[in-house]
Every structure is written in C-alpha cells, then in structure tokens.
Image (cartoon, helix red, strand yellow):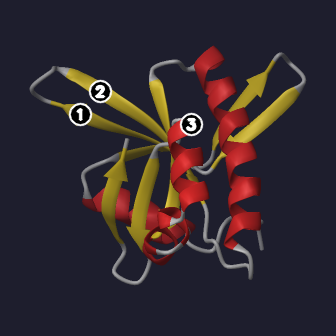
Amino acid sequence: MSARDRYHDAVKNALLKEQWTITHDPLRLKFEDEDEIRIDLGAEHLLAAEKGTQKIAVEIKSFLSESALFDYHAALGQFLNYRLVLEALEPDRVLYLAVPQIAYETFFQRSIAIASVQKYAVKLLVYDAVAGVIVRWSD
C-alpha cells in the first residue's frame, strides 16, 4: 500500500463533483535537478467567464494522530516547501492544504493555527470525508 493519505480518494472525488479535472495524481515536480516533490493532486477548472483555466495543487492531510499540532507542524513545513517549488516551476498553480472538517472546526480555530495560517498565507480546502464533499475553500 502506498503512503498516500487516508482521505486521498474522498478529496479527489469531491473535486470531481465540483467539476475539477484531475490532471495529476500525484503532481510530480523536480526542483533544481536534485529534489523531486510529489503533491497529492493537480487539478484544473475551466473559468468560462474569464476564458481561462484555474490550476491548483492539493496536499491532502488527515490529522489522525493524537496531536493535531504535531500533524500541523509537519503539514506546514511540507506546504511551504511545496509552494516554493510551485512558485519556481508552475507559478500559475495555487497550492491548497486539504484538511478534514473536524480538524478545521477544532484545531484550526485555535489561536496558534489562526495566526500561522494567516502569517504563512496557507490556503485551506476543508473536506467532509464521509460525504465526500468540499465544505469550504479558505483563501
């Protein structure tokens, strides 16, 4: 079994329900010919009014350990490095951190999470893994 997050398929299906096209599963990028990163999903959405395409990358997290703060520390470091690589190689693609609704309603309402998300401009995609839907996009 791969090391993919437990909720990978739930988020992927939720994006499909919202008319996103999954372009990469995973999105692999090589930085400076030395390091390869693998972001869980790459997706595109046609913007009819603007006659263009919106591109996103989604890193999916489950927050299942006993310490949400520990999970967030790991996720934030990964998010910041992934965003650095995307800015260099695919600057038109926006990175989102996908988090379960329960984690958003509990941990992400705590002062440290609010301050960190704001300070580091973390974009959140909040999903309901049971219903298989996206409940919130947070820019």
Give the amino acid at mark 2: Thr
**Residue 103 falls left or right of residue 88:** left
Q: Mark 3 or mark 2, which is nearer the start of the sequence?
A: 2
Q: Could you say where residue 39 lies in the image, as x and y percent from the top left?
A: 64, 44
Residue drawn at x 50%, y 41% is 118
Q: Could you say where residue 18 lies in the image, as x and y percent from the top left?
A: 25, 55
Q: 66 or 31: nearer the eye?
A: 66
For mark 1, does the 10 Å Cα neighbourhood hold few (<14), some (14 to 19), or many (20 or more) residues? some
Residue assigned mark 2 = 53
Residue assigned mark 3 = 119
User: Can residue 72 be seen here?
Assistant: yes
Q: Is residue 95 above or below residue 98?
A: above
Q: Could you say where residue 115 lies in the image, as x and y percent from the top left?
A: 55, 47
Q: Mark 1 or mark 2, which is nearer the start of the sequence?
A: 1
For mark 3, does the 10 Å Cα neighbourhood hold few (<14), some (14 to 19), or many (20 or more) residues? few
Give the residue at the far left of this rendering: 49
For residue 46, the mark is 1
For label 2, the SS is strand
**Residue 12 falls left or right of residue 48:** right
Residue drawn at x 61%, y 26% is 86
